[in-house]
Image: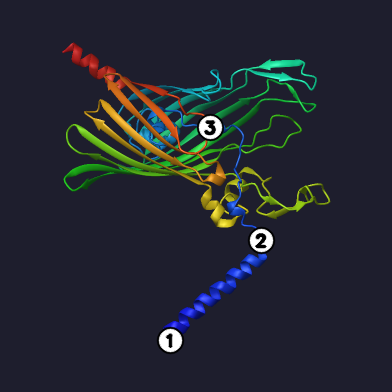
Amino acid sequence: MSYTKYISLIVLTFLIGKNHTNAQEDINYSEFLNTITTAVPFLMIGPDSRAGAMGDVGVATKPDANSAYWNTAKTAFLEQEQALTISYIPWLRNLVNDIYMAQVGYTWKLNERMSVSHGLRYFSLGEITFRGIDANLIQIVNPNELAIDLCGIGYKLNDYFSGGFNTRYIYSNLTSGASVNGSDSKAGNAIAVDINGFYKKPINLGQQAADYMFGFNIQNIGNKVSYSESAERDFIPMNLKLGTGINIELDEFNEFGIYMDVNKLLVPTPPAYKKEGNGFAEDANGDYIIESGKDPNVSTVQGIIQSFYDAPGGMNEEFNEINWSLGAEYWYDDQFALRLGYFYENPNKGNRNHMTLGLGLKYQIFNLDFSYLVPFTQRNPLENTLRITMSFDFADIKSASEIKGN
């Protein structure tokens, strides 16, 4: 058979298969808005300004005082003996002035191989007024959520690789017990764990010394939460983060790093339900009939497994659920840093698309980091907002005291 006939046969087969597929699938679900939602979404807010200035990369960046959130395994590579970090993040500052997230974290190294970390994230939703159908005041509440990192462990298995985990208690009080649709509400509670790893190896790029890094973090593996006895339980934002990066020592005073993270939620994708009239078709039990996708009402373990293949739009939609971010960082004399980043989310999965920038300052015992976000598409809760993080290096205190003593 000639090459022309062979190519023609391939093209014809492709067209027949394509027409057959289109005949069976009239709707391309991967092109529809199908955002995944979870309970306690504040867990996905990056708490520190260094990562925030680099598009929220942090899984495989150079270890610092904020490493416990992004990848607990990184803390085993910390140079500091002890580190304290404090952050403040205004939220929706263009609309209100009483919504914010605050974070404090503490990491200490037991020895050269093992580190321990603890942390607290507190999210305040400001003041909310509940009113009845007749507009009468029912209750004024101050909803809030918090996550307590009870114990994070980072352990060096060898000179290049470390493993880690973190245990977390999550509390979400959105209604202060107010009655919603005739049912008394309650606070949601969950216990979750992170499992992670970090690889760091010195390499040479020409004449420059560098560190290559890779990491992963499976975050918030935990139980579902509910805000009333009658309501269905919702998944918390379990997610998989993968990151890689390289940090180059240009010379004695100049250092440059470039990093990349990808992230995917490990919770079920909402299915496409069969339409009937102006609503959805129901089965004999009164449940909506699924036309494409999988039933999202599954256990935590099944939800994690199912999240890789349950999108109604098939693998195209699964790939759309991957967020990615790029970040770059330049340090001069380990005292002044410039940072730049970019974050991308598919338009059908939330459409967050923005650039970030910021700087870092280090003076003896203090590190001050600032970040700013510039949205490219839709409005963002962090636009026109300056995020601030201060970290406190106990090893530097000791060094400063020794210098003064001499």
- The residue under the point 19% across, 43% down is 208
Query: Label 2 sits on what residue type?
Result: Asp
- The residue under the point 67% across, 65% down is 24
Instruction: Please report whichever mark, 2 or 1, sits nearer to the chain's N-terminal start.
Output: 1
Residue 243 visible in image: yes
Query: Label 1 sits on what residue type?
Result: Ser
Q: Nearer the viewer, residue 64 or 32?
A: 32
Kindly identify which numbered label has been placed on residue 26: 2
Quadrant of the image occupied by residue 147? top right
* Spot occupied by residue 39 in the image (x, y as percentages of width and height): 62, 34
* Placement of 335 over or under 28, stated as above or below: above
Q: Which residue is mark 3?
A: 43
The C terminus appears in which quarter of the rendering?
top left
- The residue under the point 63% across, 29% down is 189
Q: Is residue 253 left or right of residue 290?
A: left
Q: Residues within 10 Å of mark 3 (few under 14, many from 20)?
A: many
User: Is label 2 or label 3 in front?
Assistant: 2
Label 2 sits on a secondary structure element that is loop
> Residue extending furthest bottom?
1
- The residue under the point 65% across, 33% down is 225
Kindly identify which numbered label has been placed on residue 189: none
* Spot occupied by residue 318 in the image (x, y as percentages of width and height): 55, 52
Label 1 sits on a secondary structure element that is loop
Q: How is the image coloured?
A: rainbow
Q: Residues within 10 Å of mark 1 (few under 14, many from 20)?
A: few
- Give the number of callouts: 3
Distance Cα–Cα, label 1 vs label 3: 60 Å
Q: Nearer the viewer, residue 82 or 70?
A: 70
Kindly identify which numbered label has been placed on residue 2: 1
CB atoms at circles 2 and 3 under 8 Å apart?
A: no
CB atoms at circles 2 and 1 under 8 Å apart?
A: no
Quadrant of the image occupied by residue 236? top right
